[in-house]
Image (cartoon, grey):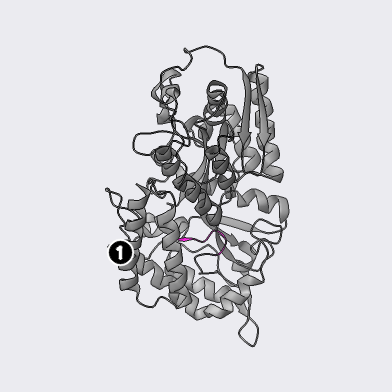
Amino acid sequence: MKRRSTVIAAAALLLAGACTPGTSDDSGAGIAPAGQEASGTVDFWHFFTDREAAAVEAAIEDFEDAHPDIDVNVTAGQDDAKMLQAISSGKGPDVGLSYSTDIVGKFCSSNAWRDLSPYIERDGVDLEQYPETVRSYTSYQDTRCAMPFLADVYGMYFNRSMLSQAGFTAPPKTMSELMTMAKALTKRAPDGTIEVAGFVPLLNFYEHTPSHIAPSWDLQWLTGDEKSAIGGDADWPTMMAWHKELVDWYGYENLQKFTAGLGDEWSADNAFQIGKIAMAVDGEYRVAFLHDQAPDIDFGTAPVPVPDAVPDRYGAGYVTGNIAGISANSDNPEASWALVEYLTTNTDAIVKLSNAIKNVPTTKDALASPDLEADEQFQTFLDIFSHEQTATTPPNASGPKYVELTQEFVDGYLAGTNTDLTGGLSELDQRINQALELGR
């Protein structure tokens, strides 16, 4: 499940300029009576490719076997921007699968996706089967325009062999341990060039981003009235100072040169998979990629380390996931709902997809299923998912804009171009608040 910030940004811009009117189904009027079988064709777009797309195709075949009167036309490899552009032009899919929970507020507030509450209420779908965090990223201001497909959970991957060779018997649990181990595991050429990094502290490298480590530091994003909480949260400068110290130890230019020469995150040449990085923040799906693309790597998984002052927070992490919704201009909302309901509530379907893709199932029944395959490495992410302090980024009508603005500031600070941390965070608050107001 791949986060692509540039695509998310493009999708948000499209939504900002295209509010698709709701239909009578949004209010519950005109939907079919309970128990009536749906039929017809459903156009389904999703973003998966290759091995993961094959798993989704298999799930669709199972759905069609269970619903012989419904045919599903599947289009793989479609990102949010393409989908939303199609919706705004009236030619979108009936059902879309998005990889961005950050954009759910925009989906719901713009009416690009239908309010699913009438269908949920009619069919008695129990939303309590999903954890509270998952429920929070599939709705916005009492409008539930999405259902959770599978979840992404973020933790720490470590190369067991490399740690052992350096004298470490366990992964780091605290930030001071991570700092010490990152330095000890790093190998440099005589001229200072990084050959192997113990840990890359740049907050825009692969999946190591502010969002994905925020719960470990207990970082606050928005206040209850949807204004930026960043400048007033003491944990933000503490987090950024920690990363800046390690960036300076490596040398920013050295890190830039090192990361520029690394393989694409989603290829077999992923830096962790070829032994160029000893420890990395990544999602649970990396377990499947490692087994498939780098079976000889002896790796372990653990929660992201936490500040030394709050060891009790260790075990929590960031959760996001895929969300499924029905386009406002769907020609067949009943059959579309049948597909969405199947993919997001059917225990057998969820478990089968989780086993194939190695994403975390979102329902209690699927998590408890004896058919769920969870080895030691994958179990780590199931445990993080269930931790009471695991969190996500809050939805809002402007979509991911506040995350993107924060990312820009953090990148500049670690590069040394933004030197006034306190003043910069205060200015960041102002920029975010302006963007949030525009989004409303």
Kindly report the secondary structure that dominates the magenta region of the rendered protein. Answer: loop
Q: Is residue 196 visible?
A: no
Foreground residue among 338 and 66: 338
On the image, which quarter does residue 58 sit in? top right
Is 289 covered by the magenta stretch? Answer: no
Percent across and percent down for residue 8 are 52, 51
Callout 1: SS = loop
Residue type at numbered disc 1:
Gly
Q: Which residues are magenta?
A: 205-210
On the image, which quarter does residue 192 sit in? bottom right
Percent across and percent down for residue 421 are 35, 73
Foreground residue among 439 and 274: 439
**Residue displayed at 52% across by 39% down:** 88
Percent across and percent down for residue 73 are 67, 30
Left or right of 376 on screen, residue 312 = left
Above or below: residue 368 compared with residue 39: below
Left or right of 191 on screen, residue 435 = left
* Local crowd size for mark 1, using a 10 Å CA cut-off: few (<14), some (14–19), many (≥20): many
Q: Is residue 38 visible?
A: yes
Q: Residue furthest bottom?
A: 191
Q: Which residue is mark 1?
A: 231
**Residue displayed at 70% across by 62% down:** 269
On the image, which quarter does residue 348 sit in? top right
Is 208 covered by the magenta stretch? Answer: yes
